Amino acid sequence: MFDILLSDFDNSEHPLYLQIYKQFRDQILNGIIPSNTKLPSIRALQLQLNISKTPIETAYQMLSAEGFAYSKPRSGYYSVNMDEFNPFKKKKESNLLLNSFQYSDLSVEKKFSIDFNPAAVDKDMFPIRTWKRMLNNVLEDFSQSIGQYGDMLGEASLRKALADYLRNSRGVLCSPKQIVIGTGISYSISLLTKLVEGTNYIAFEEPGFEPVREQFLLNGYKLIPITVNRESFQFKLLEKSKAQMIYVTPSHQFPTGRVMPYAERKYLLNWADKQNAYIIEDDYDGEFRYLGQPIPSLQSIDQQGRVIYIGTFSKAFTPALRMNYMILPIEFMSKLQKMKHSLSCPSRIDQWAMQAFIEQGHWYRHIRRMRNKYKRKHHKLIECIQTVFEKKVEITGHNAGLHIQIIVKTKLNAKDLLKLAADKGVRVYDFHQMWMKPNESGYPQIYLGFAGISESEMEKGILLLKEAWGSILYE
Amino acid sequence: MFDILLSDFDNSEHPLYLQIYKQFRDQILNGIIPSNTKLPSIRALQLQLNISKTPIETAYQMLSAEGFAYSKPRSGYYSVNMDEFNPFKKKKESNLLLNSFQYSDLSVEKKFSIDFNPAAVDKDMFPIRTWKRMLNNVLEDFSQSIGQYGDMLGEASLRKALADYLRNSRGVLCSPKQIVIGTGISYSISLLTKLVEGTNYIAFEEPGFEPVREQFLLNGYKLIPITVNRESFQFKLLEKSKAQMIYVTPSHQFPTGRVMPYAERKYLLNWADKQNAYIIEDDYDGEFRYLGQPIPSLQSIDQQGRVIYIGTFSKAFTPALRMNYMILPIEFMSKLQKMKHSLSCPSRIDQWAMQAFIEQGHWYRHIRRMRNKYKRKHHKLIECIQTVFEKKVEITGHNAGLHIQIIVKTKLNAKDLLKLAADKGVRVYDFHQMWMKPNESGYPQIYLGFAGISESEMEKGILLLKEAWGSILYE
C-alpha cells in the first residue's frame, strides 16, 4: 500500500530520515494513507529499503512528534485522522501583521479609496534606477568583503559620508565615530535604554510618538508627560519633575507639527546642562521644511554633549530600507564597547550602496527633489482645505514634515469624524494613541499625511471629506 | 578680509545660517582667517549681505558652540587657534571597529598572510549575478510597496518561503506566523529577553558562544555553566540547577564542534517539559554536515513547544546581509503583539529578494553548492593536518560546520601556540573568551575555520603551522 521508494531519494539535498518522513507525511496529508492505518513496522521498512534502523526510527518519531502519526504500545505507528489535524489552528491565530504605525482603530476590513497615511512616503519618487546601479556596483566593488562581518556600529565609510552630509545640510557636527547605523528608531531606543543606566524618569511630549513611549514603558521607565500645545512646551512641568532624560521632536513635533522655537531649544539645553540630563532629539522628518527660517537642531547648538540625535532614511528615502542613525555624545562610546554583543545593523550591502549614493551626490539631488515635491504637495493640500472648508477647519502643524494637523469646528469628536470619513472611503487619523491621557475638551484634531498620495487623490479626498463632514461643521 | 559672498549661496540646498557658518568655519579651518582674529560684527555682516540678523546670529552661535570661534563680552566673536582645536581628539579615541566575532587578543596591528577565521565564509561562492537579478527584479516588482512600512516580524511571503525550506530541508515544522525575521543573533536574543519574563537563570554551554552569553549577562540574567566535553553534556549540573532556560548549539557545538546525540536531545526535551523551561536551539551552521547520519533538530522532535529555534543566513549565504530568523512557540505570539514597538527587521527589499531566491529554487542549489564546496575544504583540511602533524595533534569537533577543533600535544599553552603561529603570519584561534571559567588543564585546544580560505592557502597555512610548532610538539 505504501510507496516508499529509495529511487525517489535525492541524497545531496535531504537526509534519509527526512525523505522517509516527508513521503509518509505527504501520503497521510493527501489521504493516500487513510486515517488510523497501521504504518509498516520499522523492521519491514528496513528490509524493504535495505537501510539501517536509525533513519526510519527518526522519521517515525518525527511523524509522531508532529502529529501525523501516533504510536500504540506493542503495536506500532498509525496515521492520524487528518480531519482533526491542524497543528496551527489549535490556538486562535493572532493577527501578527504588525506595522510600525498602527494609527487607527478602524477595522482593517474597511476599504479606503484614499488614505492620508502620515507614515507613507511618495513611492514614485524612489530612485529605482540609480539605487539598482548602486547595488549592482557595490556587489562587484566589495565582493572581497562579502564573506565577512562588518563593523556592528555601521560601515566606517558610510558613517564618514553621513557625518559630511549632516554637517553640510543639517548643521549637525560629529565625528563619524559617534554615529551608530541602525535598523530603525526602535533599535536606537533599545540601545539607548542599555546605555543610560541609572535613568528612571523620562520626560515625554504629550501628545508624543507612541511607539517610542511604549518601548520606554516596556523597559520599565517612568514617563513624565510634558504637555505640548500650539503656544508652548510646558517647561514648568519639566523643571518640577525628576526627569533625567527627555524625548523631543523639535523640527516638527509629532503629532502636533509644532516647530520648537530657538529660545525653547536654548532653554532645554540649559535644563539638560543643569540637571546632567540627556535630550533625545528625534529629527524624523527634519529634512522637510517649507516656510520660514530653519532653526538649528539641538545637536548643533549643544555645547555640553547632552544631545542624542536620531535621524532616519525612512522619510527622505524609503521606509522599506529599514535604515537609520543615531549620534551619541562622545562619553557613551566607551560604554558602547562593552555592549558590542547587543549591536546589530543593516545589511552591509545596503550600507555600501547608501555610502556610494551619498558620495556620488545622488543623495543631495534626491533630497532636493523630494523637498520640492513635498513642498508642492504641502501647499496643494493646504490650498485645497482652505478652498473647500474655508474657516470651518483650522490648519496647524504645517510648514514642515509630511503631515498636517487640522482642528475641525464641530461638536462631534474625532472618532465620529473618522467614521464619517471612512463611510466615504477616506482615511484620516486622530492619533488618539499618541496621548497618554487623552484630553477631550476643545475641537477635535485630525491628522492628514500628504507624502504618500497624489495631488489629484488629495483633491478628491478633501472634497469627499467635505461631503462627509459638511453638515456637522459650525459656520 | 573675509570673503562671505551671497552669490555663493545655494538656496535650494542649505539654509542661510548654515552657509554663513560653513564659509566662516572653512576659512578658520584653512587658516584663511588667522587665529584670535575678530570676526565682522553681526551688524556689519547684516549690511554687507543685506539679510536679517537671525541667520548671522545663528551661524555665530554655531561657530562658537562647535569651538571654531569664541565670544568676548562687549567685543564680539573671535576665531580660535586651530592648532589647539580638535573636537574629536579631546577624549582618547576608542577603537570602535567592532566585529561580532573578536576571537583573539592578538594585536590587530599584526599582519596575517593566512587567517583560519572561523567567522568568515567563502566569498567566491556568493552568487553575485543571481542576487543582483533578484534585487533588480524586486525593485521593479514591489515598486508599489516601497513607500510603506512592512510587517515588523518580517515579510509574510518570505516567512512562508522560509517555513517551506525549513520543513523540507531541516525537518523544522512551523507556521510562517511563528517566524520572526531579524538582523542577527543579538537581535533575536534581545527580543527573547523581553519575551521570557520571570526567567532569571539560564543554563549555558561551557565553553559556549560568548556574544550570546555576554548579552544575557548584560541583561542581568544569572548564567549556569554546563560543561560540554567530547564525551558528554553534563546533565547532572542542569538537573541540580535552577535554570529556566538553556542555550544550546546541538548541530555543531560552538566552539568544540561536538554534535549532540539523539538520546541527549530527547533527554533535554524531557527536562524542559518537566521544568516548564525553554530551550534555545541555535542552529547557526546546521546546514553543513559532512559525515554520518543527520540527527533531527530539537525543534523537530519537540512535542510541547519548548524549543525556540534560531537560524541564520550568515553562514550559508553571507554575513554581510545581516539576516536571520527565529521560530517561536505559538504561545509567545500574543506576547509579541504587545511589544510590537520593540521590533525591527532587515530591509524589505532584501527580504523580497531572499523570498524570490528561495521560491525560484536558487537557495536550494546554492546550499548544495556550498555544502559540496565546504565538504571538500573540510576533508582537505583534515587530510593536510593528518599528513603534516600525524599523531601530534588530534582533530575533534569536525564532520560538521565551518570550523574544527584540534588538540595540540605540547606543554605550551594556547596563547603561546597562537603567538608562534602569528610569527609565521598564520592566524589561528584559541577561543579562550568562550569559557566563563577557563580550564588550563590538559593539552591546549586550537580552532581553525576553513570556509573563508582557499585550499592552497590551507595547505600553506598548515605547513607554516608545522614550522611554527614542530619543535615543541610531543612525539
Image (cartoon, coloured by chain):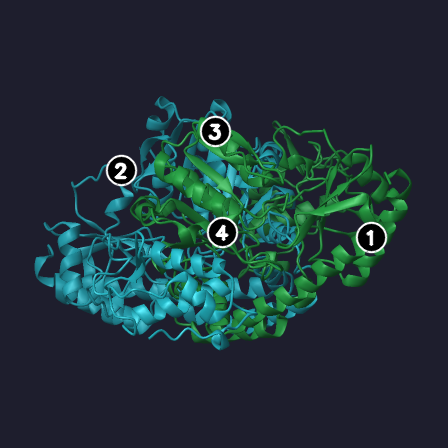
Chain colours: A cyan, B green
Which is nearer the N-term, disc 1 or disc 3? 3
Q: Dot 3: what SS? A: loop
**Circles 4 and 1 on the same chain:** no
Percent coordinates x, y for residue B86 in the rendering? 72, 37
Q: Nearer the viewer, residue B290 or B310?
A: B290
Q: Amino acid at mark 4?
A: Thr
Q: Quadrant of residue B122?
A: bottom right
Real-space Cα distance between discs 4 and 1?
Answer: 41 Å
Q: Residue at x 74, y 55 (%)?
A: B382
| Residue to which mark 2 is pinned | A436
Q: Chain of mark 1?
A: B
Q: Amino acid at mark 3?
A: Gly
Real-space Cα distance between discs 4 and 2?
Answer: 26 Å
| Residue to which mark 1 is pinned | B462
| Residue to which mark 3 is pinned | B220
Q: Residue at x 64, y 46 (%)?
A: B99
| Image marks 4 and 3: residues in contact by CB distance under 8 Å | no
Q: Quadrant of residue A398?
A: bottom left
Q: Amino acid at mark 1?
A: Ile
Q: Nearer the viewer, mark 3 or mark 2?
A: 3
| Residue to which mark 4 is pinned | A183
Percent coordinates x, y for residue A451 in the rendering? 37, 63
For residue B315, say whether it is visible: yes
**Circles 1 and 3 on the same chain:** yes
**Circles 2 and 1 on the same chain:** no
Q: Nearer the viewer, mark 2 or mark 1?
A: 1
**Circles 4 and 2 on the same chain:** yes
